[in-house]
Amino acid sequence: MASKDPPVCQIFSFQDSKTSPDPIFELPAHCAAPAAPIVIDNGSFQTRAGWAAEEADAPRLLFRSVAARSRGAARSETQIGNDIPNLEPLRWLLKSQFDRNVVVNFEIQEHILDHVFTHLGLSSEGCVEHPILMTEAPCNPLHCRQMMSELLFECYRVPFVSYGVDGLYSFYLNNGRRNLQPPHTGIVLSSGYHCSHILPVVDGRLDAVNCKRVNVAGSQAASYLQRLLQLKYPGHLAAVTLSRMEELLHEHSYTAVDYHDELEKWRCPEFYEREVHRMQLPFSGKVPGGCVSAEERQERRAQQLRRLQEINTRRREEKLQQDQERLDRLLAVQELLEDGLLDQFHKSLVELNMDSAEELQSYINKLQVAVEPGRLKLLQGDGAEGKMEVSESEQPMDEGDGVALMDPDFPEDPLSEKSAGVVQPAFNRAEYHQLFVGTERLRCPEILFQPSLIGEDQMGLMETLQYVLARYTPQQQEALVSNVFLTGGNMQYPGMKERVERELLALRPFQSHFKVVLAARPGLDAWYGARDWALAHPAAAGAEGWISRQDYEEKGGEYLSEHCASNVFVPMKIAKPVPARPAEPPVALQALTGASAAVASVTSSPAPSASTERADVSMVAS
């Protein structure tokens, strides 16, 4: 039987990349006049910002959507995104503007916008004279949009604002590249850092009523991977950081087409050795307390002795130099007395905190006694005494000499005979500092399809998709599944498209057709799609998709101008009861005096019934 080659170990190192601060760009001439729109993809993991211009082939700014400010620090000292080179030391200070995928912390959002406008070459002190196109969450709450519009119109005084859904921008961009004719119909599976969404699009418009959200995405996968590795390697808890887990997810994880079959493959030792990724942690090659020979031990003692001698000599020189400088200063003061300069002499005595010339002379004598022997010691050297002291203090206590004197039968070196014939196995420190990432590579992305793995009591992505499809007619289902589009940073795992196709094959009827398409750049296509939409729809009063300052003042901050990639503006009529009028006070009781006085009955006028009027109040919801 032919021998098989041993599997090659795959050893990787963590990049631990540190970011550099974003440069401050100059305002391009082609973006200044006329004022080009600014496209901001306000993502929960990364913020991407740039100009909506033909020359803009990529977003100018790309940074993490986090801010850090120490307690008591000024507002100007807030660090944003790439200004933080390493997130781990400041992890407890990091704040985001998002709760799940909805903006709720508008103080941090203002810091992020200041950072964007400043580094794009704009001055936000007066106003920003460029239209703003910003992404928002699907079915964004009215209050959040109202606060965002108030921030942009009131604080930055922008002329126009447009809102859109990032997954829809990516959807229309990739449909255009595939030369699909509008209106587009399909279903978008978008998975980001905090949430995943199912977005059905019917005839070029988002069907907001049937949109669904799954609260499982990239952040939950990173936390799950961190818990798994910390339980597996309790000796490396500090090294298993969240930033490294995100790197493992992005670079080393994949989605299994068949989860249970893939786990069975990992039971095979050959498959495990071939597919496991060994992540090398940084470590020091020095072995404390290792086995060293007598010659090495003697050499180390000699080196330590030389170092101690050098330290002692240096200290003596510094002490001698200080004493000599003080002696020269005191002698200079004494010369003032000898020259008859009494005023300067008394002034110098006060500076030296002395009272009389006798005290000055006493200090001079003491310093002369200390300086002369010190100078002689430096000239002659004092190595013998220091060597004797070091050799006595460095005497090893583990050689068994004292025990041998106490017990004559005890051998001098009990391990000498065994160590001569037996080779002790060497401790591999490099292997000890390796993280073996095996089934964790597929278990963490699997939570998108099985949230129960992390204890979440909700449906997975494909179960939610089946629930959404069941709300449509069979003809509409055929149109939707003919264009299943995957986008978002959490959809970049290898094998994601094949897994969705396999799940759809099990969900759909026999011999039905469907098509799954993965975005060309799942993390960046939202920004590129928003840029192309802004170029195709210039900002103007009354233009589709743009909210002007006049619209904001007349219709309120929650107003939304619809377009193909936006949320849906749904006016809702609700009944608002009119408060009832208070009842009239009763007539005062009248009492008749006298023995035969009859008590007069007092009747109060009945309170009018509270009439409720129906008022139609127009409200908006997205």
Image (spheres, rainbow, N blue to C red):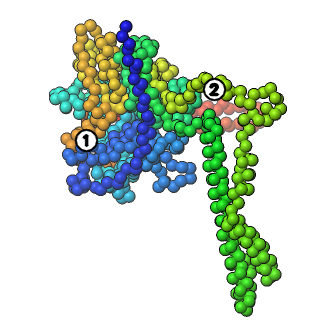
Q: Between disc 1 and disc 2, whose residue precedes?
A: 2
Of 85 and 307, nearer the camera is 307
Of 57 and 36, nearer the camera is 57
Crowd rating for badge 1 (residues with CA inside 10 Å; few <14, some 14–19, many 20+): many
Q: CA distance from mark 1 to mark 2?
A: 73 Å
Mark 1 lies on residue: 531
The residue under label 1 is which amino acid type? Arg
Q: Nearer the viewer, mark 1 or mark 2?
A: 2
The residue under label 2 is which amino acid type? Ser
Identify the secondary structure beneath mark 2: helix
For the N terminus, which image quadrant?
A: top left
Residue 485 visible, this angle: yes
The answer to which quarter of the image holds residue 470 is: top left
Mark 2 lies on residue: 419
Identify the secondary structure beneath mark 1: helix
> Most extreme residue toward the right, as rendered?
406
Residue at coordinates 40% horizontally, 50% vertically from top-left? 21
Q: Is residue 187 above or below residue 285?
A: above
Give residue 292's position: percent from left, percent from top. Answer: 61, 36
The answer to which quarter of the image holds residue 582 is: top right
Residue at coordinates 22% horizontally, 40% vertically from top-left? 532
